Structure formats: C-alpha cells, structure tokens
Amino acid sequence: MKISIITITFNAERFLLGTVRSIMEQTCTDIEYIIVDGKSTDGTVDIIRQCEGNVRAKGIDFKWISEPDKGLYDAMNKGLQMATGDFVWFINAGDKLFDNTTVRQVVDAITDNLDVIYGQTLIIDSNDNPYGERHKIAPNNLKFKHMINGLVVCHQSIVVRREIAPAYDLSYRYSADYDWVCKVLNVSRNNCYINGYLSRFMLSGISAKNRKASWIERYQIMLRHFGLIRTLVAHLVIVLKYPFSKQLK
C-alpha cells in the first residue's frame, strides 16, 4: 500500500525544508513524494534539488516539477495527475506530518473497502509554535452530511483513495478544497477516524488572507451540494451561536 504525499510550493524557501524533513523522517516509507513548484524565483528549487538524493536514500519514491501554474488548485491538480499511489495526501510547504509515526498509523488503518482516513490537526505559526486545535474539530464518524457545517476536517489531515479523488474545480479561487472534500465524502464507502493529530498546519493560507472572498465561495459551494434551505438553516445556526461563542473567548 503506497501513499502519494503531495507538496505544493511557491517561493517557500523558508518553509519547505521542514516539510520535506517531516516526510523523510517517517518510520514507514511506503511513500511516493511529489513536489509541485510554481516556478519559484527564490531558493526553493535549490532546496528541492539538495533534498532529492536524501529523500530517495530513505527508500521513498520522489518526483518533482517546477513550472508556472494558474494558482494553488491548478498545482494541486498537477500533483494528482502525477500521483500513482493508492491514496493521496496534501502536505503543502510549511505544513508537516504530525510525527514520524504518522504514515505508519495511516497505512496500518487501511483496509480494502476503506476510502478515507482522517484525523485532527494541530495549528502552528510560521515558526512552528503551536496555536492549538482548529476551531472546527473533525467528528469521529465523518460523513458527507457533516460538511454542511463547513470544512470540518482540515485538508492536511484527510487521506483519500486516489480512485475517488476528483480534480479541483478551478472556478473557485479560495475554497476549492471545501468543494473537493464534499465530493470525496459524497462517494466514499467507508471513512476511518484516527483519534489523534495527523498534521501540523501552518496558518497562512490564501483563504486566510482573503477571508471574505473565501466565505462567499463556501456559501456557493454549500448551495451546490446541500441546496438553499439547508444552507440558509446552517447559516442561521451560525448567526445564533456567534454572540455566545464570542462571550466564551
């Protein structure tokens, strides 16, 4: 059983090495590691070249490209096209696998009829200092219906059978990951929850920097997958909860 771990990067020389090391240090090396670089102009490509031999020396299949793309999700589609593993997993530049046994935990959980393995996420800053868990905690029985509450499982903590992994919809600039997970869970047969952290997610993504546009896209995605009535009810619940959640902070 092989896991294709895909890292998307662009001008990330400060963060990429830590991400690569988190892959190299895994006790289980049933890994195909793919880096998709968007034609970086800093030292990112030099770092990839320097790491290439060391990654392969660990017994990990390694491939990479560096070319212009149309944005994050176009690059992620390129990674999916390059992947040949049984499952795909996105750990982008700055993000890390939680510890060196993480891939082993995932591989050990896989069975023939399993399509999704997922877990929790530790949020870190750009200096690797932990913030804590995400505001949205992944449920221990993740289903498509849970996505009406938003992206309840972090994209870096969901591992998907490649056969059911769709291409990202490039009509969304900020929230195609939410749409992608909805599509995955709508067709997955069985989902396995690992009760623990699977990734360390660095809080600095494009959706965080463009929050309003991301919210608008997520509303459109909810309409597409759940219809008007369920979407409006879900947002009403959020509005009613918001004053109380502010008071608890």
Image: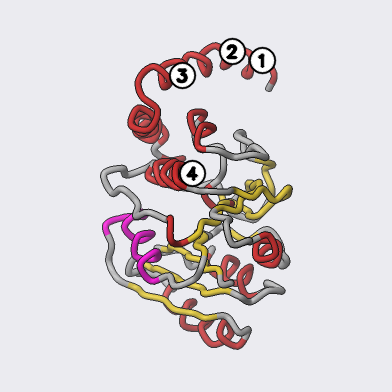
Quarter the N terminus occupies = bottom right
Give me the C-alpha separation between circle 3 and circle 1. Answer: 19 Å
Q: Is residue 231 above or below residue 25?
A: above
Residue type beneath disc 1: Gln
Across and down, in percent, residue 105 comes to 71, 62
Q: Secondary structure at mark 4?
A: helix
Q: Considering depth in this image, is 211 or 28 the residue closer to the camera?
A: 28
The dot on residue 185 is: 4
Across and down, in percent, residue 94 comes to 54, 59
Residue type beneath disc 3: His
Q: Secondary structure at mark 1?
A: helix
Identify the residue position indicated by label 1 in the image: 247
The dot on residue 243 is: 2
Query: What secondary structure is the magenta-colored segment mainly?
Result: helix
Residue type beneath disc 2: Pro
Labels 4 and 3 touching (C-beta < 8 A): no
Labels 1 and 2 touching (C-beta < 8 A): yes
Tell me the magenta residue range.
70-82
Q: Is residue 213 above or below residue 154?
A: above
Give me the C-alpha separation between circle 4 and circle 3. Answer: 21 Å
39 relative position to 19: left or right:
left
Residue in the image at 28% along x and 49% along y: 170
The answer, for residue 236, to whether it is visible in the render is: yes
Q: Is residue 46 above or below residue 14?
A: below
Quarter the C terminus occupies = top right
